Image (tube, grey):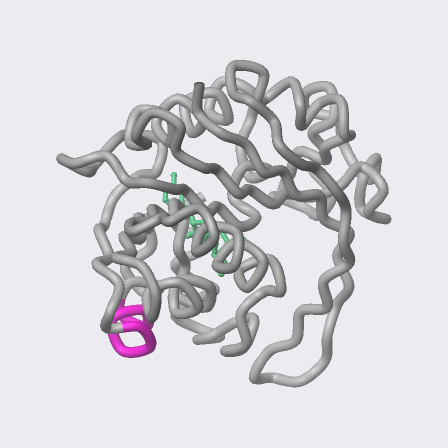
Amino acid sequence: MTDYWNRRFAAEGMIWGSEPSPSAAAARALFGDAGVRSVLVPGAGYGRNTKALSSVFKTYGIELSPSALALAAEWDPDTVFIGGSALEPHLNEPVDAVYCYDVLHLFLAAERQALMDSCLRQLCPRGLLYFTCFSDEDPNAGQGRILEPGTYEYKTGKYAHFFSEADLREHFAETEILDTGSFRETLGGPGGGSHDYLLRYIVARKR
Ligand SMILES: C[S@@+](CC[C@H](N)C(=O)[O-])C[C@H]1O[C@@H](n2cnc3c(N)ncnc32)[C@H](O)[C@@H]1O
């Protein structure tokens, strides 16, 4: 997985452009209303979404790809980027909130659980979580070889987990779920062209 993302960031740079996801603005408003001061962004990429948060909150990004980290240091110098796997905890102090955009669906079941555990361990009691992920209503869901229930190799060598609402809720079963929903995101990039994705989001509070 590291090789795949690292090669892409090295070749394509800011793959999805510089505009943050609308979900980052939604998370920023929600976190602001809740008095959040610090945010963790696991799988932060090149900082497309951390930049929408770091102007308001103390923001930490964990990212595996050295190419993404190099871009992120330039694009969003206000975020503290940490090189390493988001499947393991890295912070010494817990944060008030976690924003995680399109990372949970990258993993098989055991690693998805590890990501959830790691995020919850680095979050303070009653801390907030805002996650997005692929929806099972996206056209890629069900395409290609099935690896696990809901997880498909939808392109050669590339797989993802496609979440139903019930499945997403199940991943957050140990939290207090505050809201869920779906949205369409159009991702363009510096090379031109764009692609629509159907995503789900979930907002939850650590018990
Ligand atoms: C679909 S991209 C999303 C990027 C970012 N969340 C954003 O909003 O632009 C997935 C990102 O997760 C990173 N990633 C994959 N596995 C990871 C892991 N185990 N730990 C940390 N980052 C990881 C990839 O390098 C890539 O930057």
Percent x, y of residue 30: 52, 51
Q: Give whichever of 12, 71 is nearer the camera.
A: 71
Q: What stretch is highlighted in magenta?
A: 70-76
How many numbered marks have been drawn onto this rendered protein structure? 0
Q: Is residue 10 magenta?
A: no
138 in relation to 92, above or below: below
**Location of residue 75 by image quarter:** bottom left
Question: Position of 53 compared to 84: left or right?
Answer: right
Question: Position of 64 compared to 187: left or right?
Answer: left
The quarter of the image holding the C terminus is top left
The quarter of the image holding the N terminus is top left
Percent x, y of residue 186: 72, 68
**Location of residue 142 by image quarter:** top right
Residue at position x 48%, y 46% from top?
A: 100
Residue at position x 75%, y 57% from top?
A: 197
**Location of residue 162 by image quarter:** top right
5 in relation to 169, above or below: below
Residue at position x 67%, y 23% from top?
A: 169
